[in-house]
Image: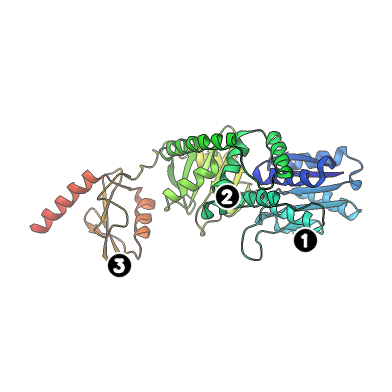
Amino acid sequence: MYRLYTHNDLDGVGCGIVAKIAFGKEVEVRYNSVMGLDHQIERLFEQEKKLKDDFLFITDLSVNEENTIRLDDLAKSGGKVRLIDHHKTALHFNEYSWGRVKVNYEDGRLTAATSLLYEYLLEHELIHPSQALDEFVELVRQYDTWEWDQNENIKAKNLNDLFFMVSIDEFEEKMTERILNAEHFEFDDFEQKLLEMEEEKIERYVRRKKREIVQTFIGDYCAGIVHAESYHSELGNELGKDNPHLDYIAILNLGGKKISFRTIHDHVDVSAIAGQFGGGGHAKASGCSMGKQAFQLFVDDIFPLDPMRQDAFKNRYNNKNSPQGALYENKKGDKFFIFAKNENKWILEMNGKAIQEPFEEFQAAENFIKRNYMAWLVRDDIYVDFLKDFYMKMKH
Ligand SMILES: [Mn+2]
């Protein structure tokens, strides 16, 4: 008997699907939340006295110290255990004979739990490879590592959307059957239609959230904070790209008492930020449960603050990166003007006076005023008035 304990996200369920394809009825699969796994493993050890006869896989998740000892004892007494994961925070399991943790492939691509499990089973000739299965595993990997975004592989994102539209059981059953019977992994017409509708719905949701985001400093980092129950990955990505001056985006789910952290930057490791609150994850995507301290910092302290003002987006004249100058304003009415003296010398004026040394890039100047003054790009009409004054002053 095979047993698989895995995560309840797409990558975790991808492991379940791969296991069902390999072992059919010979495997029992359990899907768990990050927080729920340890309890389930503890129960398994309590209730199942003949674990030594089974093969136990744990994928896409880590276990706590007590369960590590249980697993190690089981392995040492002849039981079969494998913990297969791709999270940096799980690398210490490689010290055990049963740990198989790998973050990158030799060529630099990121791994996923689904691709690692598939490769493990291939290597031990426990699964028959097929074109459709290869394609499915690669879609899951690209989604989980966010490589799909760079590769513009919408199919990978669609797979995750579909995953959230149906129950885990339904998804597992449908995908397993499809991979076993089809030559290539494809969506059917009905799913295509559903996915189009879902995409529009997500766009509207993200647009609404863009108007609710709040900016604040927490420690040394400038954070964007937003409340949202769904679409965390999409939100983290869109809000991050829209606001490159923010170090990371924190997405709060008060009902679930959870926080997700996302960043688009290499200089921030959000697994470390989540770690401060007892959570973990990847450098660019992580999460924690919302304890008292996190609630204080991310909810209570910022509740009185107004949301960030959005940059004007229909301008013809007042545009970012324009050498003639871009005009910003803040709540106090201060005006910020960024213009180019030459190719890599961007001057920043606040209320008509140059502040700071010139910046080498426009973005650095904008980051400075957005982080320190919460300024936004103003609409064309204000820009035109400003330029009129500017010109009049020069005449006198
Ligand atoms: Mn994963």
Q: Which residue is mark 2?
A: 285
The residue identified by callout 3 is 343
| Disc 1: which residue | 95
Expressed as whole percent of the image width and height from the top left, the position of residue 55 reads 85, 48
At horizontal 60% and vertical 45% (from top left) the residue drawn is 287
Q: Position of residue 14 (x, y in %)?
A: 69, 45
The amino acid type found where label 2 is placed reads Ala
- Describe the element under mark 3 as helix, strand or loop: loop
- The span from disc 2 to disc 1 (Cα, nearest Å) is 25 Å
Q: Which quarter of the figure has residue 341?
A: bottom left
Quadrant (top left/top right/bottom left/bottom right) for the N terminus = top right
State the residue lying farthest toward the front: 183
Q: Earlier in the sequence, mark 3 or mark 1?
A: 1
**Residue 32 horizontal/vertical position (percent):** 71, 40
Q: Confirm whether residue 223 shows in the render.
A: no
Residues 5 and 347: in front is 5
